[in-house]
Image (cartoon, rainbow, N blue to C red):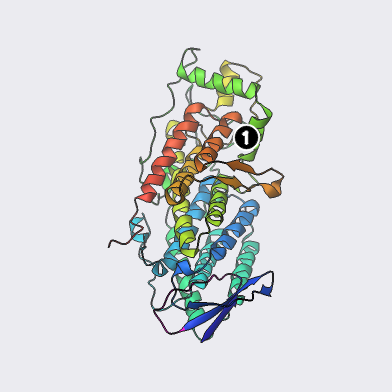
Amino acid sequence: MRYVTGLFLAAALAYATDATRVELHAQTGGLVAARDQRVFVNAPASAYDMDVPLAYYNLAFTLSKRTGGITPPVQGRIFAYMGLALYESVVDGMPHNRSIARSLHGIGPLPGNDGTKYWPLVASAALAEVMRGLWGDATDVAAQNVADIDSLEQQIADGVDLQGSLARRSIDYGRSVGAAVYQTSLDDGEDRSYRTNFPTDYVPPVCDGCWVPTAPGQIAMQPYWKDRMTGFVLTAGDCSEDGPPAFSTAPSSAAYQEAYEVYVIRNNLTPEQATIARFWADGPGTINGPGHSLSTTGQILQLVGANLADAAETYARVGLSVADGLYAVWSSKYTYNWIRPVTYISRYIDPGWTTFLPTPPFPEYTSAHSGQTSAAINTLIALWGDIGYTDHTHDADGFAPRTFARLTDSMHETAVSRLYAGIHYHSAVYEGLDQGRCVANAVKALPWRKRH
């Protein structure tokens, strides 16, 4: 009989396919619980809790705050590869699921599993390995990031006492998958994109309705993303929208009316609307918009009592949705190059007008917050239903948690927060929601399940 002890294990009692067993001792706060729970070594991934991926994603939020250049599209890309490495590393422990790597653009065959594995260790090794590449490499704090990733991986490994080669084989396999996934990222067109957020050779188009920098010295963020980045599920033109209203300064025109709506809302902002704008701002120095979506994902997984298999599929689907949601949004932004509210209003309505929050350095249409949040939330709804939850993402930042009766309500609040902030028009906000829903449906359509 082999014995396993650790912080990152959960019990499974009903897998009688092998005579070899392990005995788990659940630990809390350093104290070993009184009960022993028997689990077969070849138990599926669903036999274990989701503590391993949750720990790595929580670490990723810390890395997001301190690593230079982690803008929304860059971060979305990272989360897609993290989710893919997690899912592909444990999919052989998910009897009803299959690999989706070959269904994605630019992701070739990944290492295959051979023999029994201990899935929490596999997941840990895969996430650690892919994150060492994504958060290390040429980032400005690579040594610190890699040291923290190494420390977490070692902590998890130290919490598992497996005799024989099972632990080593599990770690080796997980690392091989993580390394392979990272390798695929190197030729997607945006490797080390944290260093290329603001290319100085980009010249914005010039027209009456075109975006211009909204602050002195501002440079457009990631203007080449739509042409250089390889989408994971989407191809160029997928999930596109019809575009913003035709440019006009006539008070009766749709363009003027949308700008005037922003003007009126900003000038009459209520305390609750101001709170909403700040809560969902997720700007530089925070975990960012994609980070907020992945924070929501972790909270939903905890709320529903998800296991390791549940978490692997959910993190993978949300990661791909966020990444391709931003790919679709960035394609729209730099296709239409639409003028920001602060520019339109200061030119044609009120020269002294200012926004509630600073305007980000890229074109208006569509809203990135709306697009990527809608992609994430609609993915969560497809998996777990339109359930309610309380968002504790910013507890440590001094914000009170916000409670929602439905995930849909959270999504709509995120979107309208950009209208309250004065940085997006109505069409950018609500067509961004449509765009994200389209992306979520494309990710949902991947062949996640085996045919029976």
Question: Residue 71 at x, y = what percent?
Answer: 56, 46
Which segment is the magenta one?
8-20
Question: Residue 187 at x, y = what percent?
Answer: 42, 57
Asked if residue 252 is positioned above or below residue 232 in the image, the reply reads above
Residue at x-position 46% and y-position 17%: 248
Question: Residue 180 at x, y = what percent?
Answer: 43, 66
- The residue at which mark 1 appears reads as 277
- Name the kind of residue labelled 1 in the image: Ala
Asked if residue 29 is positioned above or below residue 140 in the image, the reply reads below
Residue at x-position 58% and y-position 20%: 345
Q: Image quarter for residue 413?
A: top right
Q: In screen coordinates, is 359 left or right of 223?
A: right
SS at mark 1 in the image: helix
Q: Quadrant of the C terminus?
A: bottom left
Name the residue at the right extreme: 398
Q: Is residue 268 visible?
A: yes
Question: Residue 178 at x, y = what percent?
Answer: 47, 66
9 part of magenta stretch: yes
